[in-house]
Amino acid sequence: MNRAAIYPGTFDPITFGHIDVIKKGLRLFDKIIVAVSNVDNKNYLFDSDERIEIVKKALFFDLKLDRKKIQVISFSSLTTDLCKKYKSNFILRGLRAVSDFEYEFQLAGMNRKLNNSIETIFLMSDIENQIISSRFVKEIVKLKGDIKKFTTKNTIKLLKKKYE
């Protein structure tokens, strides 16, 4: 049986915390579908196409992860509809701190109400990556700080270019 999990997020930009969740998810699932949100309710630094390109460069060029096991897509639907489209009963979510849990718990409950055959799997990134957030990475690079410990080379290059 080929089991896939949907890993939805904004990935604006992708960080080592996100990458930890993807790598851990690959130990549990045959395939991870990294679903880059294209919903207009957030103020993104990168548009959807740019974020997809950043994720692909980070995963496949910088880290050389297996393209057969990871698919990167854009979506603007309910995550539960995405699960149906890709025949997945699993949503993968990352947790960094207790502060994430309440929101993620409510989201998982709502998704379960929308489709009771879908399970949300929570994974924590490694301890050294739990403090990383896309928002902090953007703020640090904007202020000309060093973000090598937070994301990949190609992501850093694209972030710096955005703030030039």
Image (cartoon, rainbow, N blue to C red):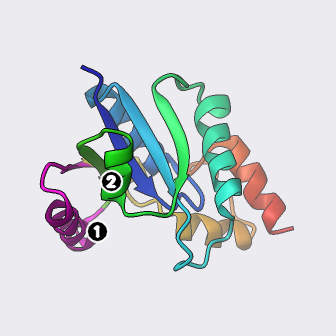
Counting residues from the start of the chain, the first of labels 2 and 1 encountered is 2
Give residue 87's quadrant in the image. top left
Q: Amino acid at mark 1?
A: Asp
Q: Is residue 70 above or below residue 138?
A: above
Query: Is 144 situated above or below 26?
Result: below
Q: Residue furthest right?
A: 164
Task: List x then y, in percent, for residue 99.
Answer: 26, 72
Please provide the residue range marked out in magenta: 97-122
Image position, residue 66 (x, y; %):
52, 22
Numbered circle sitting on residue 94: 2
Q: Which SS class for mark 1?
A: helix
Specify whether residue 125 is in view. Answer: no
Three-letter amino acid code of the residue under disc 2: Gly
Residue 100's label in the rendered image is 1
Residue 119 visible in the snapshot: yes
The CA distance from mark 2 to mark 1 is: 9 Å
The reply, left or right, for residue 25 in relation to residue 54 is left
Q: In the shown orientation, is residue 134 left or right of residue 122?
A: right
Residue 59 x %, y %: 58, 35
Locate the C terminus by quadrant: bottom right
Labelled pair 2, 1 in contact (Cβ < 8 Å) = yes
Q: Describe the element under mark 2 as helix, strand or loop.
A: strand
* Residue found at x 44% / y 50%: 17
Using the image as rendered, state which of residue 54 and residue 159 is in the foreground: 54
